[in-house]
Amino acid sequence: MRDRKDELAENLAKVERRIATACTAAGRKREEVTLIVVTKTYPASDVRILSELGVRHVAENRDQDAAPKAAACSDLPLTWHFVGQLQTNKVRSVVGYAGLVQSVDRARLVTALSKEAVRQERELGCLIQVALDAEEPAAGRGGHGERGGVGPGGIEELGELIAGAPGLRLDGLMTVAPLTGPYAGRELAAFERLMDLSTDLRRAHPAANMVSAGMSADLEQAVAAGATHVRVGTAVLGVRPRLG
């Protein structure tokens, strides 16, 4: 266990240096960017080590992995973020441990999250997942992306829905750098587009100032664009074991 702690400490330090360097290059303060460590496929023991090393935000993308891990680490001072595509039949479980759901992309999910947050007497932070590979219809709703998310044209309507839903708090926007469409291979441009969309959202909802973008391979571009949160898994925990 000592070896694993040393490994994680070294990896975490490298990621911290990358974030700090990116902040300096962008003329930003280090404290403007929050690191979220994505712990999918890794055990609760790793989460405990990360907590000992000062990590306060962890993320999961599958409820079947997250729920038992969150329960095993319920004594730790952690905020759990759910970042994967969320089916409504998993909402009750996710609301039980998550402080934020970063992958809100449709009205039906908003309704389900609100109902469950009220039932559990919790306030749940919500980020709208923006699909930059989705079409932007000239009028109204946006389409959906390959990896979830709503197109930019759907942000305003979904934002109003979340803001008005009991038990929910509209915290901002999230995206994953798209693999297809006009922003494929153009991570900085994608994240700059997300920042523009965030500016638009904050005109109506000033408190929705969280911008979650960037992962192990592209966190520098996210910081350069202005992201407030980066989601890093592999660079901290190592290459994930193959799921059998």
Image (cartoon, rainbow, N blue to C red):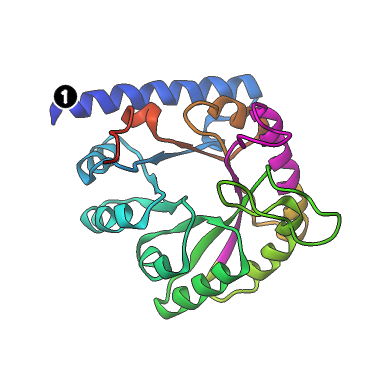
Amino acid type at mark 1? Asp
Which residue has dot 1 on it?
3
Residue at the (50%, 26%) spot, across then down = 217
Residue 115 forms part of the magenta stretch: no
**Within 10 angstroms of label 1, few (less than 14), some, or many (20 or more) residues?**
few
Observer-nearest residue: 60 or 31? 60
Relative to 55, is 139 on the left or the right? right
Is residue 90 positioned above or below 212 on the image?
A: below
Name of the residue lying farthest toward the right: 138
Residue at the (37%, 44%) spot, across then down = 56
Relative to 215, is 28 on the left or the right? right
Relative to 29, is 141 on the left or the right? right
Residue 172 forms part of the magenta stretch: yes
Observer-nearest residue: 24 or 105? 105
The quadrant in which the C terminus is found is top left
Q: Quadrant of residue 232?
A: top left
Is residue 2 positioned above or below 35 on the image?
A: above
Q: Residue 116 at what x, y percent from top left?
A: 45, 75
Q: Quadrant of residue 202?
A: bottom right
The quadrant in which the N terminus is found is top left
Q: Residue 35 at what x, y percent from top left?
A: 46, 37
Q: Residue 67 at what x, y percent from top left?
A: 30, 58
Q: Which contiguous range is marked in magenta? A: 169-198
